[in-house]
Amino acid sequence: MAKKKSKLAWRERAKQLYAEGVDVNAIPDVVYEEYKSDKVFKGKTSAKNTISRFLRETYPPKPKTFEERIEAQKSSIVTREEKKRDKKLLTKIAVTDMIIDATLDALKARPLREIKPFEVNLDRTYSEETIVLMISDIQAGTYISSEASGGLNEYNWSILEKQFDQLYIGLEEIVTRHKRVAPIKSLHVHLIGDIVEGYDIFKGQTRQIDTEITEQAIGVKDLLCDFLQKALHLFDKIHVVAVPGNHGRIGTKGENLHYVSWDYIVYKWMQSELKNFDSITWQITKSWWQIDTIYGYNFLMFHGDDIKSWQGIPYYGIDRAAKNYHELLELLGLKYNYLEIGHFHVPSELSGVTTEKFINGCWPGGSLYSMKGLVTANYPVQKLFAVHPTQGVTYRYPIKLTLPKKRK
Ligand SMILES: [Mn+2]
């Protein structure tokens, strides 16, 4: 300090300190301490404010340049955003901590689990179930040349016969397996149309069949009868329900009613041929739709050729048809729980609020038309499902009809 303080008024002392290069923010403290005993100030805070104001007026701060102001503004924005972000982060961490603490407290409060021996009742019995086998879209008589399809598919009458063997092997395997758990006594066979391929359904079809229509009907009737007779080894009772498809129609489209069909002839013929078998019952009508009731569940079936597809996709049409049938059947006071259709060759199951829909697969697999035009081929499968007295449809299986290939 250059001069003794008492000889200077506080203003002069402040200027002196400033001239000595003391930090302008530190000067009010120094001056107040030196002069407070002189009673020139009222109180500490007001003294410091007065001294600071004096210094600001005497030495006004140098105005900042535009660039400096931009920098200052930038840093103030950054500071403000950082503060905001920190606040959010702190809140998040605090809330998470509170949840973890509360969870840990709740866990501590849980009583210990009692150790008890686990009991399995091996003698428990399960309810009987009934098996449904959907058979459709056999299209017996279809011929697909391996050469014309570039090896993608091959189909002919001899393959069809082997597929019937595969269908039985699949059925036997599934049924004997499940019989170990629960009694199975009845098989319901749902014949859903397109049993024969026909010969004049589309242009050029005669070059895609290897069997005349009459032989298609006789041959497939024999194969189906053999199959049913064999299935009596596995079941006490077989119930057959049948509706016609579009491939067996006789005459041009719309010329005759839907039951004027080779499918209908095949069904009636099967019934007549197997009339000695009391354990096989038949539900064949002239209608295009049928309902089969199993344990009180109603299974509605029709072929599906009246359902429109959009861009080759039938699902919207199926959904609409399913809803419309609910309304139509109200005329008879009937309700149905499950819908079964064929025709689309795309094996699928669609769930709904009250109705589950089953769409069966086909036997010939990808046709020249589907593979060349739509670039799609479906695996030949038929659908099997089980009906439980209180659960409705439970397990379901695709039975693959393709012969197992030898591994190379
Ligand atoms: Mn069809």
Image: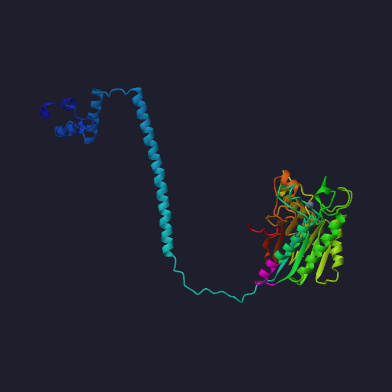
User: Going by the image, does 297 lie left or right of 119?
Assistant: right
In the image, residue 149 sits, relative to residue 172, either above or below, namely: above
* Residue 165 colored in magenta in the image: no
Q: Quadrant of residue 72?
A: top left
Q: As rendered, which of 381 and 355 lies closer to the eye? A: 381
User: Going by the image, does 143 lie left or right of 378?
Assistant: right
Residue 107, position in %: x, y?
43, 62
Dominant secondary structure, magenta: helix
Q: Is residue 286 visible?
A: no
Name which residue lies at 50% across and 75% down: 117
Name which residue lies at 81% across and 65% down: 225
What residue span does the magenta drawing correspond to? 172-183
Q: Is residue 97 visible?
A: yes
Q: As rendered, which of 109 and 227 lies closer to the eye? A: 227
Name which residue lies at 28% across and 23% down: 62
Residue 218, position in %: x, y?
85, 60
User: Going by the image, does 19 lie left or right of 264?
Assistant: left
The type of colouring in the image is rainbow
Question: Quick one: quadrant of the N terminus?
Answer: top left
Residue 5, position in %: x, y?
12, 29
Q: Quadrant of residue 54?
A: top left
